[in-house]
Amino acid sequence: MHPSISLTVNGVQRDIALSDPRVTLLDLLREQLHLTGTKKGCDRGQCGACTILVNGRRINSCLALAASHDGADIMTIEGVAHADELHPLQAAFVAHDAFQCGFCTPGQIMSALGLINEGQAGCDAERIREGMSGNLCRCGAYAGITDAVLEVQSNLAEAKERQIA
Amino acid sequence: MKSFDYVRPARVSDAIAAGSLPGTVYLAGGTNLLDLMKGGVSRPDRLVDVTRLAGLDRIELLADGGVRIGALVRNADLAHHAAFARAYPAVAEALLSGASPQLRNVATVGGNILQRTRCAYFYDMASRCNKREPGSGCDARHCNNRLHAVLGWSDTCIATHPSDLCVPLVALDAVVEIEGKSGRREVRLDDLHRLPGDAPERETVLEPGDLIVAVKLPSDAQNFAHHARYLKVRDRTSYAFAVVSAAACLNITRSKIAEARISLGGVAAKPWRAREAEKLLAGLAPDAENFRRAAEAALAEAEPSGDNEFKIELARRIIVRALTAAATGTPERIPALPASPFSGQPGASHDL
């Protein structure tokens, strides 16, 4: 039996026939939905290049069977910007030189979005580094990545403070 | 990956009926299973997806002071459950020192307990492995084995159990609730995993169809809340399995240790409870000399299984360091880098 599943991908509801129970969310996104922003690095849950948000939480899409995620709400890097306007995290990655080759960047940004949603790291650089440890960057842009995430976190914290005041 | 049938039952009884069939495995978070299937190490005919079974994703604080953790609770959710982390801080610290945030968001409590060894020869299909292919031999025994077992190993298998979570759980007398073909039963976590002996392919006492539905901690596990730590030493600061780890939980009353709980990770095929060391500390002062004696007792039976003699003294020092940190007191908040020597937290230095 090959199940068909329903997913909300970047706000759009899709009904998808699964050709094979082995299909991962990563392969489904890239090969069936042609959303190739999500990258396949190691395909074994070790590099984080395939990070997406499922129901608001960051996961490795290479280790997620599509069949098991019927009904899930998925956000990929393609759903992050608003039309031509970059998401603040994307802008901060540009401003802080947080990438070189760019292959890990979609995963880094989705992971950082997840990290910010989790609300555990705050503006502590050490907690941000630890919180981003599931994303490897072969070019070694870690310092820029930490700075970019830290800037967005700090702006969010300031905005929240202004709201309260 | 070999193809498989995929079923997703809605009820536990249906899952067990399906799970009892030969060639069947349960799928929960899948973070370990899919990796094994991609490598051809695990080749099931049928996956029974248990992720939609109702009621297994709850953390219940019990009236008797204990806690019941559903098998489908995700590692991150358990670690960040405020009341749970306050009562069982070493468990939360162990959870946060494991894997990556992405994996912790998916990996379940039941799956963590049943995860397979990370022995490279178990994963490498070109290597001989008695666990993967009974009777074929063990290539770990004479190859790269600096990370392998120093306690409870046999000539057939020197693999270690990689879980962080299990280490404080076994120290706190966790009990595993199992649903099987003949109903529900409870097994102490300490009795769940088997040592390799001459059958390393049999890793647990579970029978075909058995499904872990919950893990329970007894009420007295809270007695250690003020003096409980989990320390993990890795080859890199973060996102790596333990070379050696230790859970140290103390109940300190009037400057004396009323009760101690100590367990080790990364040293054996199961989370290793150091009962002799615990007994030795009862009634003593929480000081460096007593901690060292306890560490000596904990590793009294240890033997290198290869290029890993260093792990024995490392484990002793990690026990001393964990006990010292526990005696200092559970920190207000779990450090950013739990137990890392690079952490800015007091007590993080190795030079104790």
Image (spheres, coloured by chain):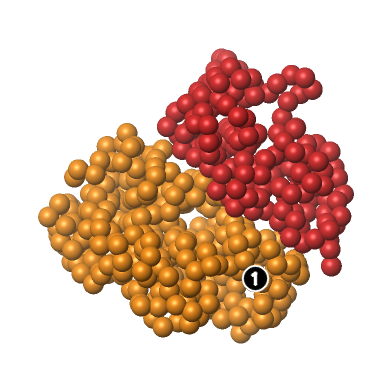
Q: Residue A131 in the image: x percent, y percent?
A: 50, 38
The red-tinted chain is A
Examine the image and state in which quarter residue B59 appears. Answer: bottom right
Name the outermost residue toward the left.
B289
The shade of chain B is orange
Image quadrant holding the N terminus of chain A, namely bottom right
Image quadrant holding the C terminus of chain A, namely top right
Between B114 and B79, the residue placed more toward the observer is: B114
Image-based side of B2 in relation to B97, left or right: right
Q: Is residue B171 visible?
A: no
Between B68 and B349, the residue placed more toward the observer is: B349
- The residue positioned 80% from the left and 60% from the top of the image is A20
Examine the image and state in which quarter residue A36 appears. Answer: top right
Element marked by disc 1: loop
Image-based side of B46 in relation to B287, left or right: right
- The residue positioned 12% from the left and 55% from the top of the image is B289
Q: Residue B186 in the image: x percent, y percent?
A: 50, 76
The amino acid beneath tag 1 is: Arg
Q: Is residue B184 above or below residue B323?
A: below
Between B67 and B142, the residue placed more toward the observer is: B142
Between B315 and B297, the residue placed more toward the observer is: B315
- The residue positioned 51% from the left and 24% from the top of the image is A144
Examine the image and state in which quarter residue B170 appears. Answer: bottom left
Q: Is residue A144 above or below residue B273?
A: above
Q: Is residue A78 visible?
A: yes
- The residue positioned 57% from the left and 27% from the top of the image is A99
Crowding around mark 1 (Cα neighbors within 10 Å: few <14, some 14 to 19, many 20+) is: some
The residue beneath circle 1 is: B43
